[in-house]
Image: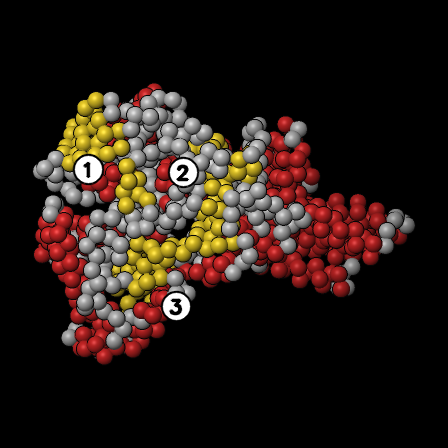
Amino acid sequence: MRRRDLLLTGSAAMIGLRPRPAAAFVREGDRKTLVFSGNQPVPVLDPHVKYDYSTRMMQQSIYDALAKYVDNPARVIPWLAKNWETSADGLTWTFHLVETAKFHNGDPVDAEAVRYSFERGLKLNKGVAWMLKDDLDPSGIVAVDAHTVRMQLRRVFPGFLSFVPWWFIVNPKQVTAHQANDDYGQQWLAVNEAGSGPFSIRRWDPQAVMDLAAVADYWKGWPEGEQKRPGGVIYRVIREPAPRKAALQRGEVDMVTDMTPQDYDQLAKTAGIKVSSNPGMTPFTIMLNTQHGPTSDVNFRKALAYATDYNAFLQIENGAARLLDSPIPAGMFGHIAVPDMPRQDVAKALEYLAKTQWPKGGVTLEYAYVAGLEVERQIGLAMLNALQKLDITVNVTAVPWPTLVARGLKAETAPAMIAVYVTPVSTDPDVVASQYTSSAAGSYWGMHHLQDPELDKMVAAARIEPDQAKRKTQYAAIQDRIVADQPAIFGMVEDRRWAMRDYVQGFDFCPVRLTGEVDFYPMWIAAS
Amino acid sequence: MLGVLSRRLGLTLGMLFGLVVITFLITNVAPADPAALAAGPDATPDMVATIRHEYGLDKPLPIQFLRYVGDLARGRLGHSVVTGHAVTTDLARFLPASLELVLLAMVFAVVVGVPVGMAAAVRRNRAFDHLVRILAVSGMALPEFWVGLLLLLVFSGWLGWLPTGGQLSVATAPPAPITGMVLLDALLEGRFAVFAEALRHAILPAFVLSLPALAAVVRVNRAEMIEVLQSDYVTAARAHGVAPSRIVGVLALKNAMLPTLAMIGLRFGWMLGSTVLVETVFDWPGIGLYAVDSAVAGDFKPVMGATLAIGVLFMLANLLVDIAYGWLDPRVRTASS
């Protein structure tokens, strides 16, 4: 064979290797299975032990809760509970359960299952426990009858209901049957399920793929109708954004999350692909170390806040973001646009700087960001550029998340500036306001280490105020107070975006879900 | 020979203990708090304390070390703080996928590298030789992470010839785990379509993983061949009219292969280490990806387990090479006795 013939044969063989353009979704008979891809694995499934966006997305698919967050603006709707009522003093909550709900093994979802699940979550003291453990004691949860559960709170907590959707109900019979060494079935439930949700596990490789089958006789039915309901959902982990984008383009997956702003813009222009862009509720802030170094001086912090080029933030996001006008993001109860929210004003920044020990600048500050987050890196460069006008040098350092948190938890080691996203898991403003209290130290969202006793009192009072009108006024004052303290540079709220094939239907955005998280229940594929 | 073997075994055990000490120290001096990370971002201090106590992380470091060594002696590597899984179970699950990738890469590196090195030596200082040397240097210098992403973009994103990652497409049910190696298990089950699909998925990661070894094999083999081809016995063979192909392919290659063999042993260990990068790019569910995911989560026991597993395999590979070397080269046996 001549060399040219060999080359031609080789080329033909390579072309033969090229797969024919395939439909992205997987077919199972007359059903279609949606394939979704994100960057994060699902290491453990136990709904009372761990949650992050990928884990919760799977938990939400497999389990049900008493109530559920839907829509934008977010609202809590009844789910396993058909309705509920509170006592006049606000201390007792009574939930009435639907009678038709059943677990995947056929057992009924009854009041005892609800009681056991809340008790399990509280006693394990992991994952979701922090949301209710100060307000609800396991002994305060009573199964009144088969379909009624009463919860007695330790103190008035108007935000109680906003956390209930995070507490998934497990089948106590299955869990206790697999209990080992009083572990509440943790080892078993980490890799198995005992839920009543719209999907059940078909195949699970924690590092790579989770394949869920739709429950044909799901007790709540399917919003798109039995005809259109999917055969299941597959979550595929692709860690790098470039191959994830390629997978969507070449039809290996139907929907992706966690892409760069540039990728989303490019995908939006691609035929057959649509991008859903939604105003998020995850504030991006640059936390300032309020206890050590120059940033311990509130005037210095004000100088930084006024020197910041906020428009650069929006440019970095290609416009897919909104500037924060308050520490509490828009869409949350009690949000106000704080009148004195700093915007770039170099003259004012210099005025504040003149009141500090460093009137002419001449200091170096560390801006630490999570290694690998490109937007945070670019914002660091924008800060470096903006603070040159105050003769302040910025060291932009990439730090792995575990190391950043470890450093940030102690005021002595916390960098002067830390770039952080904090997703609120409730529509109750307390979840944000409490991030600026002295009790927040020890959590990653408290890496500013602010100590303001007056603010602490204000937040504590607003938290338990039953009168919503009064509460609204209290939170307005709290927002003013936080901005006056300036424990952070309040940056922006990014749009939450997903790119998907145009035949993907039923996507419902809700800002209370974690960044990247999708509710698969109402989704289906409209393609032949 | 027995002396060589016992000395090497003793040295390997010593190195193993050193590795245990170093991995334990490195993972424990890192500033991250595994309990805090496992508890989640919103956890309160008492929730973190619960996890710290559950996994014995509240004990002093020397106690933790003694417990770890004690567990190791009983074949236990502890539990993941994030998942609660036994690390030994996880390793048994993920190691075969990595070994499969490494073996594929190694076979490719040897099958391609040895003939190319030979050909470059025979055509020394000609265009082919220059090209091979440039490619060999590039193969060693280019970061695998970058090459992997680039090849993914070209062959998966643009040309659409190969899949974007993983071992199989999401719609394909994997074969029953007999050996844990998908390719082998597919063959054992007689599922040839799955075998073909798995092979397509393995092409890019195995190629990228093989690049440094391929470059090293080419360079070493070329250099050894050049030296051997100039030796007296080759000149004598030529004078006796032995066919050039037999001189190069049999007489010279046999002697030139000894250093290449040592290189293969070394590269086996390096390749296992490189799986950390390659498996991350290609989402290959092996021990490297397991180590990366665990490190990102600050989950130290799996990181230590993966490091130990890679270290032990590295040492075993070197031990086997030493034994093979002694068997192939009588001078090694003579020197040791």
Mark 3–mark 1 Cα distance, whole angstroms, equals: 42 Å
Q: Residues within 10 Å of mark 3 (few under 14, many from 20)?
A: few
Amino acid type, mark 1: Lys
- Please report, as a chain letter, where disc 2 is located: A
Q: Which residue is mark 2?
A: A223
Amino acid type, mark 3: Gln
Q: Which residue is mark 1?
A: A133
Amino acid type, mark 2: Pro
Q: Secondary structure at mark 1?
A: loop
Discs 2/1, front: 2
Same chain for mark 2 and mark 1? The answer is: yes
- List x then y, in percent, for residue B221: 70, 52
Discs 3/1, front: 3
Residue at the image position 35 percent from the left and 73 percent from the top = A385
Residue at the image position 12 percent from the left and 55 percent from the top = A474
Q: Which residue is mark 3?
A: A315
Q: Secondary structure at mark 3?
A: helix
Mark 2–mark 3 Cα distance, whole angstroms, equals: 39 Å
Asked whether, in this view, residue B214 is left or right of residue A302, the answer is right
Q: Closer to the N terminus: mark 2 or mark 3?
A: 2
Residue at the image position 58 percent from the left and 45 percent from the top = A23
Q: Quadrant of the N terminus of chain B?
A: top right
Q: Quadrant of residue A296?
A: bottom left
**Nearest to the observer: residue B297 or residue A493:** A493
Figure disc tally: 3
Q: Residues within 10 Å of mark 1 (few under 14, many from 20)?
A: some
**Nearest to the observer: residue A75 or residue B290:** A75
- Please report, as a chain letter, where disc 3 is located: A
